[in-house]
Amino acid sequence: MAENHSHTHLNGINLFYAILLNILITAAQIIGGLLSGSLALLSDALHNFTDVVSLIISYTANHFARKKASLNQTFGYKRAEIIAAFVNALTLIVIAIFLIIEAVKRFYHPEPIQTGLVIWLSMVAIIGNGLSVVLLHSDSKKNINMRSAYLHLLTDMLASVAVLIGGVLMKYYQIYWIDSFLTLVIALYLIVVGYDLTNKSFGFLMLFTPKHIHIKDLVEAVHQVPKVNKLHHIHVWYLNDDELHLEAHLDFKEDITLTDFNAILLQIEQILHDQFQINHVNIQPEFQKEDPKDFIVQD
């Protein structure tokens, strides 16, 4: 069996449209916030601005990830999107902390605002961010970089909903604390999703063994193949969302020929792909070689 190269290449066009929408939303919110005196609207505009930067990072990473490998970059730029996802995940947490600080300040020091302008601009932001969320919804399920961009847009939309609700309640019921409360709720949500995305992308960057892979189960499956003695010196890692790699040393019970090894390797590749979703396999064959035979050996 040949290696399985079922890679997902996303052209980023939906992300580009989302960037344009968010630039327009941010500009409108800055102007509206200055005219209305709304700190909530200006905070949301700042949130949107940082998300525009994050979306541009994601778009740039998506562009680089599609570049072909070369002699100097043998993997190409496939890990660019992992770096972008990690950076964007961290910014989600930073934005959440900023929102919490601003929410507490507004709770103790409410300011009069022109609620009509706030309501209309928040509705514009909800529609714009809603369209962006729809554009990236499908891509977010296939790619960690697109997921980080999608989460930024989703939280943008939720923040705008909070501004809208706050504007309506302040305009008609004079309930001024609701804006701060909703901002706190959104900030806590940001921390939860930001931490999850940070943890996942950090694991990718550090080449950690994926959580669904249990090395002992993997070894047991490979050891069922005839003539195989012991799989050791094992490394399993994600290069990106699509490529799950394994490299290892494989000790044989017999001094087999290369033809025999090729046949056995095909069986092992099939097992690793079907049972563990590993689609890139690099195995070094050995026979009675004097080296450590532990599953994991520190290089």
Image (tube, helix red, strand yellow):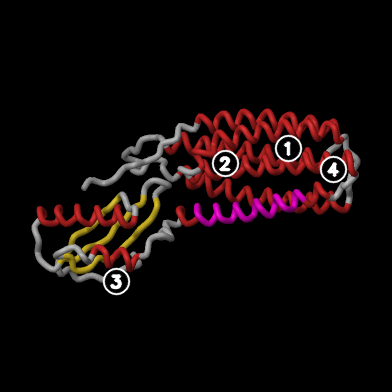
Q: Amino acid at mark 1?
A: Ala
Callout 4 secondary element: helix
Q: Residue 218: where, in percent of width, then height?
A: 31, 63
Q: Residue 140: where, in percent of width, then height?
A: 51, 42
Residue indicated by mark 3: 294
Callout 3 secondary element: loop
The residue positioned 53% from the left and 46% from the top of the image is: 85
Question: Observer-nearest residue: 77 or 256?
Answer: 256
Neighbour class for label 3 at 10 Å: few (<14), some, many (≥20)? few
Q: Residue 115: where, in percent of width, then height?
A: 86, 36
Q: Residue 129: where, in percent of width, then height?
A: 65, 35
Q: Amino acid at mark 2?
A: Tyr
Predominant secondary structure, magenta span: helix
Magenta run includes residue 48: no
The residue positioned 47% from the left and 57% from the top of the image is: 203
Q: Quadrant of residue 235?
A: bottom left
- Circle number at residue 150: 2
- Circle number at residue 160: none
Query: Magenta region: which residues?
Result: 182-201
